[in-house]
Image: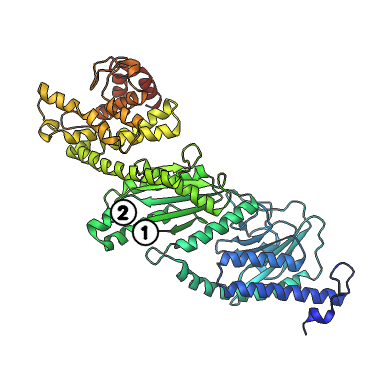
Amino acid sequence: MSISRALGPEVSWAAGRTPTEARVRELLDQQAALRELAVAVGEMRAPEVIYELVAKQAAGIAGVDSGAVVRFRVDSVAEVVGSWRMGSRHTGSLIPLDGTAGVAIVARTGRPARTNGSLASSEHKPGAHQALTWGSSPGGVAVPIRVRRELWGSLLVVARGEEPIPPDLEERLAIFADLVGLAITNTDASARLLAQATSDPLTGLLNHRAFQERVESEVGRAQRYGRPLALVLLDLDYFKCINDAYGHQAGDAVLMQAARLLEGGGRAGDVLGRIGGDEFALLLPETQAEEALVIAERWAAEFRAAPVGVAAHLTMSAGVCDLTHANGSKELLRLADGALYWAKSQGRDTVVLYSPEVVYELSDSDRADRLQRLQTFMSIRSLARSIDAKDHPNEEHSERVASIVRRLAEAAGWPPVQVAQLGEAALIHDVGKICIPDEVLLKPAPLTPDEYELVKAHAALGAQMARDALSDEQALWMEQHHERFDGNGYPNALAGAQISEGAGLLALADSWDVMTTARSYSPSKPEREALAECLSLAGSQFSPAACKALETIF
């Protein structure tokens, strides 16, 4: 017969119970806590889950509000590895061990100690970790945790308000801490097995399932404590081409090198995973979306700057979202994926920060139509790249024009969606030149009148080619990007307000890149000189409004 059954249903565990009854209840509480802990260890739950459970159980056994598991580090600093109801003093906080608080005393002496309600003293040297305090709480108790007989850390409970500290609490917690040490020993062994089951075998990062579980647990923790959390989803652009051209071994080498690059740009506490073939994800606790955007853009720049494996110019597309827009883990993943989808649809090699104004929801039919348009666009984009590649110094001309025209549109006050659409049109603005013979397109001598008429046709031809991939407005920007404000342009000799604003911005961006990029037939101009020339042509070749936008960014 169990102890609880022997005492009978008439026993009350409320105030006024006898000392014997109270002691029996304490033993039952400890047994229940240890059973729950044993189940968690047996199920090979992640260490951070185990530590949070221990913190919760310790607070329950002590009859106080809050608990924490603290691990001592070799640099005279301790880290909160599990917490329960600690408010802003959450898991991951660092604690200096040079003060008079209970945890610091445990670290120095290896014996239990009372604490005055703070994890660390309020006196710090310049550059020291910030003290974590609980204000006017009556205090708590810190006891040592030993793993394989070595001092590993401390179990801490903290009272709040008028909660009393039982006189024998050190003894009771010390017994529980000894059992926790055994659980941690088993957890470390389980963690090694768990790592094998949750790691991607190629890169060593978390696999898809493990990363999804971490997202769920971190979102729950962030929502519970009201803390920020951001997610970055990213794809390697055109990775399939690497596998097709060089084989899967070369592709695997690229993935491993990409994983190391991503790891090198991460911070302590960030969670990185490989969630698909060429798809990676980064979870950033204590981080707003704008901070995550900076990290993702730095990654994108690093990918552009250095070759990765056999890929001379591997790039990445990324989508960023945080909990200000999402109510849970599934929605956070979905919205970040939507931002990634838009990054890829805007020509790739870009990072998109989720906002309802930029990324909108698509029905299945809309998404299928958009995907078909994207595939068509990428085919046209390949043709446009081949045009740029014909003249080597002019390689990546379209990318530079797209970058400049987006800045011009932003300076002109365009909304984000239209900025992205103008950049998309810029990436293929010269595709119509594919119809012009090389002997005309690359002719070093002056063109004949007939040859010039042939060249002039490329704007309208490119717009016609783009209509299956872009909107009518985007195609119009392409068609008109060689029109002049004074009416002396082509193909239709439009003037002034007859020319769309987007075409005016695109025309200026195109000319700016021609001026500032060295070519076989002309040297590059310094930006100051190029700006002066563009401003002098406002109202004749270029739109005055476009020149005003240019003046604000250069």
Give the image location of residue 189, x and y in percent. Answer: 52, 75
The amino acid pointed to by label 2 is Phe
Residue 550 visible from this viewpoint:
yes
Pointer 1 and pointer 2: residues touching (CB < 8 Å)?
A: yes
**Residue located at (85% from left, 77% from top):** 20
Answer above or below: position of 294 versus 501.
Answer: below
Which quarter of the rendering shows the N terminus? bottom right
The amino acid pointed to by label 1 is Gly
**Residue located at (14% from left, 32% from top):** 441
Answer above or below: position of 4 versus 536.
Answer: below
Q: Residue furthest bottom?
A: 1
Q: CA distance from mark 1 to mark 2?
A: 9 Å
Give whichever of discs 1 and 2 has the lower sequence position.
Answer: 2
Answer above or below: position of 315 versus 277.
Answer: above
To which quarter of the image does residue 75 belong?
A: bottom right
Give the image location of residue 432, x and y in percent. Answer: 22, 33
How crowded is the residue under tag 1: few (<14 C-alpha within 10 Å), some, or many (20+)?
Answer: few
| Left or right: where 250 falls relative to 49 | left
**Residue located at (50% from left, 53% from top):** 283
Answer above or below: position of 442 versus 543.
Answer: below
How crowded is the residue under tag 2: few (<14 C-alpha within 10 Å), some, or many (20+)?
Answer: some
Q: Which residue is mark 2?
A: 239
Give the image location of residue 340, x and y in percent. Answer: 42, 47
**Residue located at (70% from left, 59% from top):** 101
Give the image location of residue 482, x and y in percent. Answer: 26, 24
Q: Which of the numbered marks, if any, corresponds to residue 277?
A: 1
